[in-house]
């Protein structure tokens, strides 16, 4: 028995309805729709990630309190892959050896990040 779909004798099945059950065949329209939805989700995650990287970078651009000073307040900004962010932060020298730092950043895609830290120096 010879196959109708041998090389040089290919056939296209047309006007295939959308598959409904898990064992149904999928048509190009359904496949393309699924791929478009997946790409949209990937793009959304990328926007959030790029904005988050920008916000984290903006936080690191805020200088620490200098030796001999008690409090520093600052602003940082950054850009990553076309996504901008701004951050506000403060650091305080509690004692000669103890410093505290707090900050928050906001990215252009709407995500916010917050952080804090403490260090003891000797």
Image: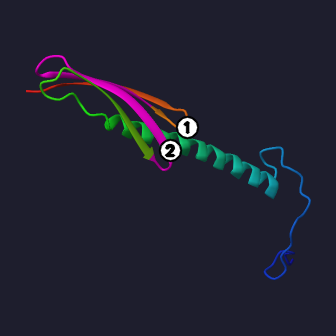
Is residue 116 rendered to the left or right of residue 104?
A: left
**Residue 83, labelled with which disc?**
2
Q: Position of residue 1 (x, y in %)?
A: 87, 77
Residue 49 vertical placement versus 97 (above, below): below
Residue 99 forms part of the magenta stretch: yes
Q: Quadrant of residue 120?
A: top left
User: Around disc 1, counting alpha carbons within 10 Å, would you say few (fewer than 14), some (14 to 19), or many (20 or more)?
Assistant: some
Is residue 1 rendered to the left or right of residue 101?
A: right
**Residue 94, labelled with which disc?**
none
Is residue 54 rendered to the left or right of residue 24?
A: left
Q: Position of residue 70 (x, y in %)?
A: 19, 20
Q: Quadrant of residue 65?
A: top left
User: Around disc 2, counting alpha carbons within 10 Å, would you say few (fewer than 14), some (14 to 19), or many (20 or more)?
Assistant: some
Residue 45 forms part of the magenta stretch: no
- Compute the Cα span from label 1 to label 2: 7 Å
Q: Along the line of sight, which residue is nearer the eye, 103 or 14?
A: 103
The colour style of the image is rainbow
Q: Along the line of sight, which residue is nearer the eye, 76 or 39?
A: 76
Q: Along the line of sight, which residue is nearer the eye, 20 or 53?
A: 53
Question: Could you tell me if residue 37 is visible in this image?
Answer: yes
Q: Residue at x 69, y 52 (%)?
A: 35
Q: Are marks 1 and 2 in contact (CB under 8 Å)?
A: yes
**Residue at the disc numbered 1:** 109
Q: Residue at x 49, y 40 (%)?
A: 51
Is residue 14 rendered to the left or right of residue 53?
A: right
Q: Position of residue 38 (x, y in %)?
A: 66, 47
Q: Quadrant of the C terminus?
A: top left
Q: Along the line of sight, which residue is nearer the eye, 73 or 14?
A: 73
Magenta extent: 80-105
């Amino acid at each position: 028995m010879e196959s109708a779909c041998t090389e040089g004798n290919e056939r296209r099945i047309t006007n295939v309805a959308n598959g409904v059950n898990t064992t149904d065949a999928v048509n190009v329209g359904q496949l393309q729709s699924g791929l478009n939805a997946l790409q949209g989700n990937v793009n959304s995650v990328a926007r959030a990630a790029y904005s988050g990287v920008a916000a984290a970078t903006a936080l690191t651009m805020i200088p620490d309190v200098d030796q001999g000073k008690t409090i520093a307040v600052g602003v940082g900004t950054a850009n990553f892959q076309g996504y901008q962010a701004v951050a506000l932060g403060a650091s305080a020298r509690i004692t000669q050896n103890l410093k505290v730092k707090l900050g928050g950043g906001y990215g252009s895609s709407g995500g916010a990040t917050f952080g804090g830290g403490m260090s003891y120096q000797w």
